Image (cartoon, rainbow, N blue to C red):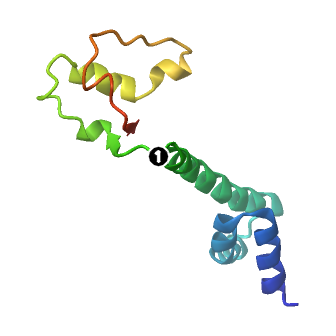
Amino acid sequence: MTKTAELAHLFRQLKAPAAARALPKLAERARGEEWSYERFAEALLSTEVASRDSHGGESRIKAARFPQRKTLEEFDFTFQRSVKKAVVEHLGQLDFLHAKENVVLLGPPGPVSHCTSAVTR
């Protein structure tokens, strides 16, 4: 078994397709820039982690079977005038999560509060 085939097999066993795709270019760059083994391992693993992070949210949205996908950028503030654009944009930065603060949304029931779409950034 060649080294390439062996590595491909190991990446499949680890279920790390992003790292497998990144390996050739990262290995070439590491050789050219004389990276340490630790630096190379960090770059390869970071590629896989970033891929999983980005696909994790997509998988959860897909599993939720929302009928539509909406973003804050697509929200029509002219249709729902009671919603303040500046407040929504501020909340969309998620600073309240890092500050460990609560957000309470109050208002009458209606199309916005009964939305069944995924709202993502």
Closer to the camera in the image, 114 or 80? 114
Residue 32 percent location from the top left of the image:
67, 76
| Of 115 and 18, the residue lying toward us | 115
Q: Is mark 1 on a helix, strand or loop?
A: loop
Residue carrying label 1: 65
Which quadrant would residue 98 be assigned to in this image?
top right
Which residue: 49% across, 45% down?
61
In which quadrant will I find the C terminus?
top left
Q: Horizontal placement of 57 versus 18: left or right?
A: left
Where residue 119 appears, as percent x and y from the top left, is 38, 36
- Residue 36 shows in this picture: no
Whole-percent x, y for residue 66 in the image: 42, 43
Q: Which residue lies furthest to the right in this view?
A: 1
Residue at the image point whose x is 52% and y is 12% from the top: 101
Q: Nearer the viewer, residue 108 or 43?
A: 108
Q: In this view, does 36 lie above or below 111?
A: below
Residue at the location (32% across, 42% down)?
Answer: 70
Determine whether 17 is above or below 91 in the image. Answer: below
Residue 18 horizontal side relative to residue 13, left or right: left
- The single residue placed furthest to the left in the displayed view is 78
Residue 20: percent from left, percent from top: 69, 71
